[in-house]
Amino acid sequence: MKIVIETESNTYSNEDLESFFAKSDHLEIADVFKATVQDHRYYSFLRSHYRRDVPLSKLHRAISRLPIKTIFTTNYDKLLERAYRDRNGIDPPVIIFPEQLGYIEDTSIRIIKLHGDIDHPKTVVLTRMDYANYGSRHREFEQKFHNSVNEYTMLFVGFGLRDPNFKRIYYDARGLYDSGKRLAYAIMTDTNQVERDLWEKDQLKILPAKSYSQVATIIEEIRASAKVGSP
């Protein structure tokens, strides 16, 4: 069966697409998908996947019990907000646009969504072009992240340490200071000693988890060791 996909400016055969999918990463594939279905269907597709009513995981509940004030997340969904709502009865402030940093204080818990929010689909960072334009459009977010990495103890959970955008922002942050760098931590599955040693040279200590289900347990152990919060 012959398949032909048309975008606004090009027509692709199934042979072209098969070759492209075999060689491309998910960012480039997302670019082609968005161009193919056009904006309104693309945003509808995102909402159908990230606005689903799914149960909260043990991990989301464990995070909501940590003694922290600022959460940086690259997730677009609303699960963290739900976890805090279930725990405290109200949603925490959510920062989606850089200009919000100026008037939402960090005196209580707040969630900074680095890659957008599904209720504001144009803010979602997913395609190759989204990543390419990120630095110019989100300078305030990057500056806030830079300051936090160097001034506070950071714990990365579920962050893609292999994500090129994360690496760029993290190394930019570390490059701001030559000494006195705070050690950051990351809980990761599927890691190895070589990777852990490389990251530790850059002031980030990986806490290995045998499986995803163990991540929530490690977070609970961190909270218990701090002797704060409630069970």
Image (cartoon, helix red, strand yellow):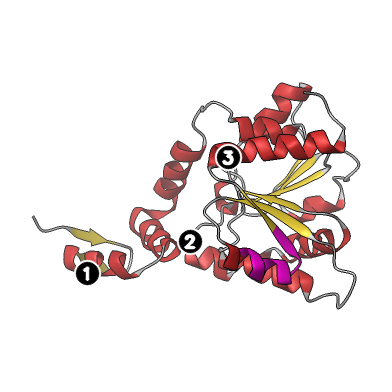
Q: Quadrant of the C terminus?
A: top right
> Which residue is located at x 67 percent, y 65 percent?
137
Circle number at residue 92 = none
Residue lying farthest to the left in this orientation: 1
- Secondary structure at badge 2 equals loop
User: Marks 1 and 3: CB-CB under 8 Å?
Assistant: no
Which residue in the structure is indicated by mark 3? 77
Which one is earlier in the sequence, the residue at label 1 or at label 2? 1
Horizontal and vertical percent for residue 106?
Answer: 87, 45
Q: Main secondary structure of the magenta part?
A: helix
Query: Is 104 above or below relative to 24?
Result: above
Residue 135 seen? no
Pointer 3 local density, CA inside 10 Å: few below 14, some 14–19, many at least 20 = many
In this picture, residue 189 sits left or right of residue 45: right
Horizontal and vertical percent for residue 2?
Answer: 10, 58
Circle number at residue 16 = 1
> Which residue is located at x 44 percent, y 42 percent?
44
Q: Quadrant of the N terminus?
A: bottom left
**Does the magenta-highlighted stretch encompass residue 187?**
no
In the rendered image, which quarter is residue 77 located in? top right
> Which residue is located at x 32 percent, y 70 percent?
23
> Which residue is located at x 83 percent, y 54 percent?
153
Circle number at residue 127 = 2
Q: Identify the amino acid type marked 3.
A: Asp
Q: Identify the amino acid type marked 2.
A: Thr
Q: Which residues are magenta?
A: 196-205
How far is mark 1 from mark 3, CA to CA? 33 Å
How far is mark 1 from mark 2, CA to CA? 20 Å
In the rendered image, which quarter is residue 108 located in? top right
Query: Is 24 above or below relative to 113?
Result: below
How far is mark 2 from mark 3, CA to CA? 17 Å
